[in-house]
Every structure is written in C-alpha cells, then in structure tokens.
Amino acid sequence: MNKRESGGNSLIRQVLFSEKIGLMAALVVVIVVFSILTGGKYISRNNIINILISSAIVGMVVIGECYLLITGHVDLSPGSVAAFSGVLISLLLRSGIPLAPAIMMVVLLGLCVGFLNSLLVNRLKLEAFIATLATMSIFRGLAFIICGGKAVFVSDKFFLKMGSGRFLGIPIPVIIFLVSYIVFMVILDRTRFGRNVYMVGGNATAARLAGINAQKLRTKIYMMTSGFAALGGIIQAGRMSSGQPMTSEGLEFDAVTAVVLGGVAMAGGVGTLSGALIGLFIMQGFNNGLMMMNVPSFWQTVSRGLLLIAALSFDYIRNRKRKK
C-alpha cells in the first residue's frame, strides 16, 4: 500500500470515527428507538415542535455552560436564576411596568448574578462548584420569598406571545435560541475572544504568559451564562403564563449533560458549540421520549442521572484517548 492510499484510509477512519459522526449516530438511534416504541408519534410535527421548544429553553444555558466548561469551570445556579427571573418578571408586569423595560431589568439582574459568581470564584478563590451551589440555593430561596411560594400569573399578550407565539410558523423561543446560538458559535470559532477561551481552558500558564486576563474572561462568561439563564426563565414564564418558583429544577444539570455529551471536556480546553447542540438534541429527545412513553417522573429523574453518568464516562474515555 502506497503512502497516498494509507493517507486516504487514515482520513476515512477519522471521518467514520469522529466524535461528531458518533454523536449524530446516537441522535439517530434515539429517534429511531422512540419512534418505534411510540408507534411513530415521536416524529409527529407537534412533538418535534415540543422538542425544539424545550431544547431552546435549555439551550440558552447550554451556550453559557459550553463556554464555561471549555475554560474549566462550571455553573450550577442557572436553574435557580431562571426560576427567580420568571417570578420577578411576572411581578414586574403585574405591577404595571412595560414588557421591554421589565425584560431589560431581569436580564441585567441575571448578569449581576454572574458577576457575583465570578467574584466568589476569582476573589474569594472558592471552587466554582461550591460557589455556584451556594448561589443556586440563594436564588431558589429568593424565588419563593418574592412570590410567597405561589405562582404569579400574567396576562400581558406580548409576554405570552414571547413564550408561545410563532413567527413564520417557527416558535419564537426557537428563533431566539437559534439566533443566540449562531452569534455565539461565530464568536467562539472565529474571534480572538473565542481563541482566548480555548487557551485559558487548555493551558492557563501559557494564556497568562500571552497576556490573557483569565479572571476577566471568566467573569464575562459567568455573566453571559446567568444572563442566558435569566432569558430562559423569562421565556419559560411566558410559555407557562406565570412565574413559578419551582420551575427549571435541574436545568443546570440538563445543560451540563448536553454539553459533556456533545464532546466538551470537563477538564477544559476542548469542545465546540456545534457538538453541544447535538448533545442537547440527544438529551432533550431522550427526555421527551420517556415522557411520551408515560414513564413515571421519578424514573425519568433516575434516567437523567444515568445519562449524566454516561456523559461523564464518555468524557473520561475521550480524555484518555487525547492523552495517548
């Protein structure tokens, strides 16, 4: 065999066994299996739209978590921030504040939560896991406090349209997510900021010697993650016609599972938003399939935990292969 043939075979093997091909194959398996088990209802138009909408809400947080994990950090507070944001905007709208200023105020507060997380990590030198676990508890509690533990119903038609409306037949939450995803994929793949994200996660020492301020960069990403969580909470409240303090429980774990399934290394420095998107569809498709099969909610919770273990196991295997 000559070098050209050997090189061609090597290229074919790389294509066949690349992570993206494996992820797409896993997504196809999920679709085929649940389509068979549900008698084709899984791939109905209405169910596909449901999957896309649920993916859009989780996907907001996936964008931020993807950036954070590439830098070697994680945020466990998005679910609580989303619930708090949903309750807060509902209260603001009921008090007579117009929709646009209310959204701006809630997203700004989300950015402030991200800044708080970054202070705990950068200044107090707390582990990201511990710091954001604390803020997760704080803002879940605040969500209950500001509404007295009761749902806050809203009748603002533009707000409700933001969660349930459509533009050219496409659900508005899906449009918001796709636009956000494309913008931040370009930033990650094509800009100096994106290159700095990979450098900080891959080799912090080299990044420092190159003049990159890792703390400042992580602050921006923490703020971005919480901002997206707040936006997701706003959309969720619009979809439910109310702000509810119990919503979005486990949102952060779903987001982390999707990101790790999509090939982003927990150790940092490796991964793409495109892979995270496929991981998101695998996870949301899996969750939706369980609901369509009327699997009890507590078994769904067990299944999500097992899926997270599987994602972390794949991450461990990928890391071992990269080190060889």
Image: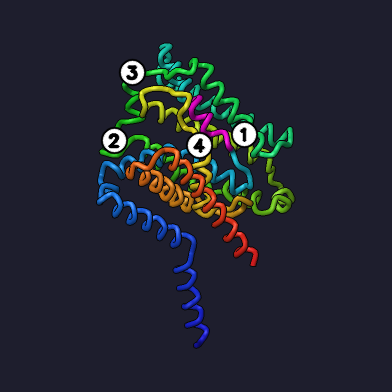
Tell me the amino acid under the disc marked 4: Gly
Rounded to the nearest angstrom, the CA distance separating label 4 from label 3 is: 27 Å
Q: What residue is pinned by disc 1?
A: 133
Distance from the alpha carbon under mark 1 to that under mark 3: 33 Å
Mark 2 vs 1: CB contact within 8 A: no
Q: CA distance from mark 4 to mark 2?
A: 29 Å
The amino acid beneath tag 3 is Ser
Mark 1, secondary structure of its residue: helix
Q: Position of residue 113 (x, y in %)?
A: 59, 28
Q: Amino acid at mark 2?
A: Phe
Q: Circle 4 is placed at which residue position?
A: 250
35 shown above or below 123: below
185 or 276: nearer the viewer: 276
State the residue at coordinates (65%, 64%).
Answer: 323
Q: What residue is drawn where x is 36% and y is 38%?
A: 53
Magenta range is 76-85
Mark closest to the chain's N terminus, 1 or 3: 1
How far is the residue under mark 1 from the one under mark 4?
Answer: 12 Å
Query: Looking at the image, is mark 1 or mark 4 earlier in the sequence?
Result: 1
Report the label total.
4
Does residue 108 lie above or below 195 as drawn? above
Q: Is residue 239 left or right of residue 324?
A: left
